[in-house]
Image (tube, rainbow, N blue to C red):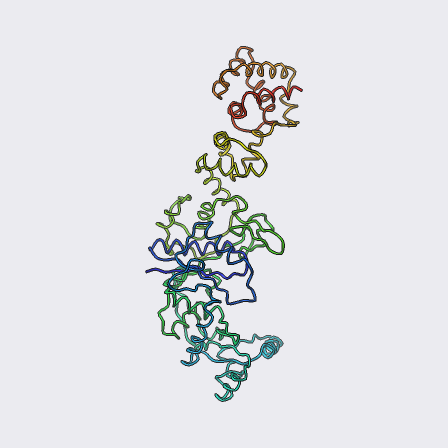
Amino acid sequence: MVRVRFAPSPTGALHIGGVRTALFNYLFAKKHKGEFLLRIEDTDQNRYVEGAEEYIINSLNWLGLTYDEGVGKGGKHAPYRQSERKPLYRQYAEQLIANGWAYYAFDTAEELDILRKTAEAKGETFIYNWATRATLKNSLVLPSDEVQRYLAAGNEYVVRFKMPDNEVLKMNDMIRGEVVINTNTLDDKVLFKSDGMPTYHLANIVDDHLMEITHVIRGEEWLPSMPLHLLLYRAFGWEAPQFAHLPLILKPVGNGKLSKRDGIKLGFPVFPMDWTENGETLKGFSGEGYFPEALINFLALLGWNPGNDQEIFSMNELIALFDLEKVHKAGARFDPEKIKWFNHQYLQQKGNDELAVLFGELLKNKGIEVATSTLQKIVGLLKERATFVNDFWELGKFFFEAPTQYDEKAMKKQWKEQSPLIVEEVAALLRNATDFEARGLEGIVKQYIADKELGLGQVMPVLRLALVGELKGPDIFDIMEVIGKEETVNRLFRILE
């Protein structure tokens, strides 16, 4: 069975790049009728941020990326929080030492810092690897009794991976194809520390193996770790999963990876939901009024292409079509305008009843209560021009509030000498109307225009100014029907005053 995982670190808000990684894992699992896990990788306790784990889970739930097992849900491989799995990592570190794939290193941070600075002074770079390990303070060099004394005395140490000397590694990536690297270019990474905490590399491999992960789908930034991870599988004698490294999400303009700062600078969200940091709330896609399905659709096409011109996909369609072979190698540029376009498309697809409920909640916050049937009519009239539910207020606040001022430029152009008489006569006709339905009202006003031998341009703009305050909005007779006879007549007389 295909088993994949999303394994974020709780070091802050979930970046949109992480969301796409979760999405592609989810789509791959569902495509192959497999399982999708959530594991929290919190081995770096110094970077742990309170509330980040809950934020990750809430974000996945909002997006509909339901995981089959993991933190908060349990499963046969629990626990799924690495800090709760701490005791088991030591035995695997010791196993690597015993079989010659790792060693104790007792060099202090100060000693290594001196070595780095000395190398820099010569224009060189110090690397703890095959070329230097024999000159340093580790169990490959020290006598075994001295190593035991260090350990018994409680001296600080790390366990380092012993990278093979001068081996050409040929690796396969499901997106990038063959990747070749010589091990002499790699360092001896730290796997375990004397405080009992593993590094990402050891915990990641051990957990993926124990949780029976078959495919590791992760961001391009982890590609340099692929040689070490594959060698760790070899060292343990385990079968490695297949790897796929997703392309970076790039800035809208310029070079480089999309960051939180880009969103702040250019005014668009880069997080799924709102996140408070240092007393400041950073808006997420949810808080800005985006629909989760619009964000999913947008992210799915950020680095993946189904091979046709279709752009709008349901989740089921994405699952059916998703294929890692169609994921691009090159970075995908983030386009804030394109996701707005997606949101507009999804808003058009929603029923007026659903939109009325969403808009009704916004109105309640403004202290406005309106019948659901009326709201359904209003959103139906406005939705074509709306991108977000919040837009309904700006597009149609005249439905709830009579204008208190009138567009000055439009008044100068449209308000003529005969306008007061026209408005007064139309108001009288509408006051006497027995049926205040839009099409009937249209018949009354157009008959008046014909009888008076007027042009539409002499009548319709001034009526719109009276009802809306400016020359915008849906059909004027639909507006009259929604606000009703009394309010329509009152607004017509108010502009005369």
Q: Quadrant of the N terminus?
A: bottom left
Residue 452 location, quadrant? top right
Above-or-below relation of 492 to 54: above
Question: Residue 42, how many percent across, how many down?
Answer: 50, 65
- Residue 308 vs residue 155, the one in the foreground: 155
Q: Residue at x 42, y 44 (%)?
A: 311
Above-or-below relation of 459 to 290: above
Q: Quadrant of the C terminus?
A: top right
Residue 5 location, quadrant? bottom left
Q: Is residue 254 left or right of residue 78?
A: right
Question: Residue 158, how many percent across, how many down?
Answer: 51, 77
The residue furthest top is: 451
Above-or-below relation of 79 to 101: above
- Residue 497 vs residue 329, the one in the foreground: 497
Question: Residue 417, how many percent across, how many down?
Answer: 65, 16
Above-or-below relation of 252 to 204: above
